Image (cartoon, helix red, strand yellow):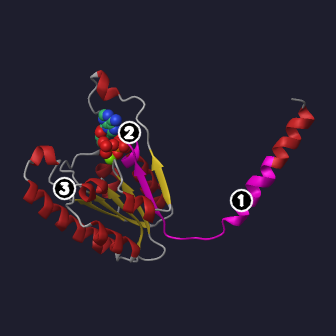
Amino acid sequence: MGDRAHQQRMARKKAVIDEAIARADRDKGLLVVLTGNGKGKSSSAFGMVARSLGYGYKVGVAQFLKSRRDTGEEGFLGRQTLVQWHVLGDGFTWDTQDKDADIASAQRGWQVAQSMLSDTSLHLVVLDELTYLINYGYLDAEQVRADLLARPATQHVVVTGRAAPRMLLDLADTVSEIQDIKHAFRSGIRAQAGIDL
Ligand code: ATP
Ligand code: MG
């Protein structure tokens, strides 16, 4: 392609992009759903926490289904004054092996989530690994939907977890599915600090 043809093509492309940018002129508290089997859901959510903190916004994080307190994200982000950090799980179901306890813990956890979803001072709320609690029926999907809908109009929410249920996909403004193409774990490499936890 000649220089001139390339220049014309790029100019047309720029006009289309500029028009799309001009059309997107509203602000809104978003529901972002990060799902799929590949690595990168929670770390992307924590990336948005860091971005929000960069503007001085307050952030709330709820980590469901997690019992360990020694993760890098909690060690750094959980210590920031603008962040409230809740670890709500008693571990994965295959660790606890006690369904009633898991349900009770999920419901206690959701009460904490509800308090963040009604806190107008929070710019962003991360509900990490929430999908499992809905999929297992530990939380009532309708209740979760109602609480998400009732949140402050400018509050952003990021939900992570595999197999996001239909209800979340329908309610979300942005959905990304992270595909698992390769993962080091399958080559016998354990979870490593700073990358996996
Ligand atoms: P990350 O926290 O690294 O962004 P994630 O939130 O996308 O991962 P989870 O399903 O929450 O993925 O799993 C968390 C842990 O499991 C991390 O240590 C991650 O590296 C690992 N993991 C994620 N996806 C896979 C996979 N496809 N196979 C094996 N291990 C995985
Ligand atoms: Mg995760």
Distance from the alpha carbon under mark 3 to that under mark 2: 20 Å
Mark 2 near ligand 1 (CB under 8 Å)?
Answer: yes
Around disc 2, counting alpha carbons within 10 Å, would you say few (fewer than 14), some (14 to 19), or many (20 or more)? some
Marks 1 & 3, CB-CB < 8 Å contact: no
**Can residue 197 be spotted in the picture?**
no
Helix, strand or loop status at disc 3: loop
The residue under label 2 is 39
The residue under label 3 is 89
Distance from the alpha carbon under mark 2 to that under mark 1: 31 Å
Quadrant holding the C terminus:
top left
Per the rendered image, the range of residues in magenta is 13-42
Type of amino acid at the residue the image marks with label 2: Lys
Please tell me whether residue 24 belongs to the stretch shown in magenta. yes
Numbered circle sitting on residue 20? 1
Q: Nearer the viewer, mark 1 or mark 3?
A: 1
**Can residue 127 be spotted in the picture?**
yes
Helix, strand or loop status at disc 2: loop
Around disc 3, counting alpha carbons within 10 Å, would you say few (fewer than 14), some (14 to 19), or many (20 or more)? many
Residue sitting at 43 percent across and 77 percent down? 152
Quadrant holding the N terminus:
top right
Helix, strand or loop status at disc 1: helix
Residue sitting at 38 percent across and 58 percent down? 166
Please tell me whether residue 53 belongs to the stretch shown in magenta. no
Q: Nearer the viewer, residue 42 or 94?
A: 94
